[in-house]
Image (cartoon, rainbow, N blue to C red):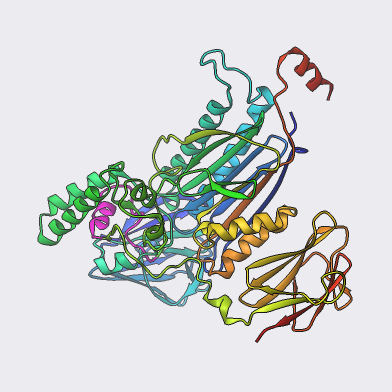
Amino acid sequence: MAKLILSMDGLVLKEIPLSKERTTIGRKPHNDIQIDNLAVSGEHAVIVTILNDCFLEDLGSTNGTLVNGNPVKKHFLQNNDVVELGKYRLKFIGEAPVPAATAEKADFEKTMVLRPSAMKAASEQARAMGAGGAEAARATAAQQVAASAATAGTAEKEARAAPPAPAAQAAPAAPAAAAMTTPTPIPAVTPAPSPAAAPAAKSAHPLGAIQILSGGNAGKELELAKPLTTLGKPGVQVAVLTRRPQGYFITHVEGANPPTVNGQSIGTAPHALKDHDVVELAGVKMEFFLKG
Amino acid sequence: MDLSHVLEIATCTDPGMVRSHNEDSVAADPAHGLVVLADGMGGYNAGEVASGMATTVITTEIQQLLAKVKPYDIDPESNKVVAGQLVREQVMKANASIYHAAQSQPQYAGMGTTLVVCLFYDNKALVAHLGDSRLYRMRDGALKQITRDHSLLQEQIDSGLITAEQAKHAQHKNLVTKALGIDPTVEPEIREYETRPGDIYLLCSDGLCDMVDDGDISMTLEALGANLKLAAQQLVQMANDNGGKDNVSVILVRVQREYPAARGVVGKFLGWLK
């Protein structure tokens, strides 16, 4: 059964199971959850429970109801949602069985911990459930262990966090474990669309280059293909040209004076370069241009 | 011995482009040669609480202890320098604090954090780590990853199930096998390395190494090594330009000269004169 944990200033006051179809919250004594505080309206809000789903509705309260920091009128409660009425917080702990699909949608970027101990609890839970689905889940879990057998015998994640991952944090105990058995597959090799280093954005911008205008190397051209290129004399005056999705920037690295762009000192902050800007650095003039 | 004139330190931390909270936490104390980086995990804002507790507990406790002992003092019982034991105990203390907070306060249930701690003393770097936050070293133009992640991915690479190349595209980059605050006790991995003048040490959360490849990190340290603060900002900016899917934190430490321990009567006397 879903439940609410009432707390104030981090102190837990009580746990309230959502056993009724309508659970009312307010300052007046006839409410199911009475919060005797002037910031709470007489009839402040109600939680309607239909099967496994709980809906929070603000009953036109004076000071409003916040869910995870946002004011709401009506809200479909998700596991770990935090409802705030004045200084009071009600944390919603949903009832587990999470469909596999939801579990898979869980925020994969969030760092999570694997624990062998929790794994054991999970597979026992699955065995106890006995149903076909649970068996399958256990099999998956077993495979995972096999897959990482060479390792510490891992598997079963204790997902904490991510509001969209309702599996998490119910308690370190069994309900969480049950949710975890749902096969969130841990394939040995799954080429996923790499979230990392996708320099596609970079190439969208035209390639830039620098042409030296004065000094011994006058006339030479330098393409700025790398994410960063340093220019100047180390120990005297150095600047870096960075290639970013928004274009090129020049930043002062070392030396007593920052370089100038079109005769103006750029200071210590990054300075965006435009086509045909003239940079002067360590006594050498050079022109920046885009190669289209 | 005050190391603030030996170590140049720059830190930078950023929530990234996607997340609203920054769950990473960094701390640096050049005088004691101590840097700490933690990447918190946990619902609502519990991740910040865990990483914040880790960096605060570890820095303040070690600072207090270093007022009494020197990291290169010899422990009469084990006949080893005290540094390793000192760091290990404070990591465990931080673990206990986070674990108890998580147990006693429902809004913190399940919170935890990765950790990298580096204590510099006597021309050495003592490194303790848990999870997938990393330490790299830039020496003679070559970048080397010093710590090995405690992650499912790393275990799969070690057991030969997948190659490092495949790992770059794996889905489960985020599953760590060890972290601070998850279990009542934890054993951090502790190692010691010799340092050399000119070395640059990079501590980072996975928000950096997942978004920026080692080649670009190396290039940045090589090109901007003269301006550590700018290099740190540049690394964070590159992670954000590549998508910034996670919080990004960076600590850079440059060893400017040798810092041997002042041992023996003469050394102690000289140290006392300073």
Indicate yes or no whether the magenta region holds residue A162.
no
Residue A143 or B140: which is nearer the viewer?
Answer: B140
Residue A98 or B169: which is nearer the viewer?
Answer: B169
Highlighted magenta segment, given as a residue range: A164-183
Residue at figure coordinates x 58%, y 43% from the top left = B55
Does the image show residue B157?
Answer: yes
Residue at figure coordinates x 58%, y 67% from the top left = B240
> In x, y percent, where is residue A133?
14, 62
Residue at figure coordinates x 75%, y 70% from the top left = A250
Instruction: Specify the quadrant that holds the C terminus of chain B.
Output: top right
Q: Is residue B222 above or below residue B20?
A: above
Q: Quadrant of residue A242?
A: bottom right
Residue at figure coordinates x 10%, y 59% from the top left = A131
Q: Seen in the image, is A195 located left or right of residue A274?
A: left
Instruction: Name the main secondary structure of what is drawn in magenta.
Output: loop
Q: Quadrant of residue B181?
A: top left
